[in-house]
Image (cartoon, helix red, strand yellow):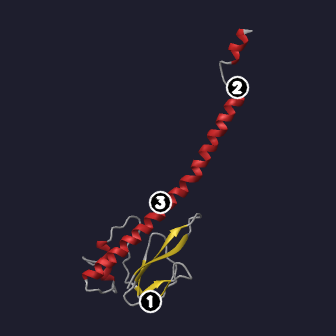
């Protein structure tokens, strides 16, 4: 009788092994589903931080230039331009001259559009509407869960 009890306690049954494998598989599935979302959220956070840094550089450049708003490509790309002041991570600094007023064109991921004389549109996210002459807005895009670009807008005051 004692020898039968010892024999039964020496290993795992097939059912126990299958349960452990099923639980391990479920944990791996959850991890593989969560990682891409975490990476996308991290990239979107970096994009928003880059835009905030760029708006700070616009304000600094404006203060250094007598309150002027950027109006030419050289204001962005010159030796003492805004692009040299901004510390960007994944966003591409703009090289085209800033546009003015209302804008509603598409903006690609990791690029930005500087818009002067405009405020962010509160009814259509990502667009701009005409605003005070000294205001600067930046249009950009973040990723959604499908990887598509979702337009966004941030502004600095007049």
Q: Earlier along the polypeptide chain: callout 1 or callout 3?
A: 3
Residue ID for mark 2? 13
Q: Which mark is residue 142?
A: none
Say which element carries label 3. Answer: helix
Residue ID for mark 3? 42
**Quadrant in the picture for residue 97:** bottom left
Percent position (x, y) of residue 117? 41, 88
In depth, the one of 94 and 21 nearer the eye is 21
Q: Earlier along the polypeptide chain: callout 1 or callout 2?
A: 2
Residue at the spot 31% in from the left edge and 76% down from the top edge = 82
Q: Is residue 41 left or right of residue 61?
A: right
Residue at the spot 62% in from the left edge and 39% down from the top edge = 24
Instruction: Please say if 39 is above or below 150.
Output: above
Res 77 visible = no
Calculate the distance from the C-alpha at mark 1 to the C-alpha at mark 3.
32 Å
Instruction: Please say if 116 is above or below 48.
Output: below
Calculate the distance from the C-alpha at mark 1 to the C-alpha at mark 2.
73 Å
**Quadrant in the picture for residue 20:** top right
């Amino acid at each position: 009788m004692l020898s039968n009890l010892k024999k039964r306690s020496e290993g795992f049954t097939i059912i126990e092994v299958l349960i452990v494998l099923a639980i391990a598989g479920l944990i791996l599935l959850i991890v593989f589903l969560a990682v891409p979302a975490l990476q996308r959220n991290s990239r979107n956070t970096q994009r928003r931080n880059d835009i905030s840094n760029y708006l700070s550089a616009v304000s600094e450049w404006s203060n250094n230039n007598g309150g002027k708003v950027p109006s030419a490509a050289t204001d962005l790309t010159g030796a003492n331009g805004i692009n040299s002041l901004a510390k960007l991570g994944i966003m591409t600094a703009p090289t085209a001259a800033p546009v003015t007023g209302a804008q509603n064109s598409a903006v690609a991921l990791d690029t930005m559009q500087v818009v002067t004389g405009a405020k962010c549109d509160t009814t259509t996210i990502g667009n701009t509407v005409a605003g005070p002459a000294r205001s600067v807005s930046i249009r950009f895009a973040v990723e959604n869960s499908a990887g598509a670009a979702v337009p966004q807008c941030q502004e600095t005051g007049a």
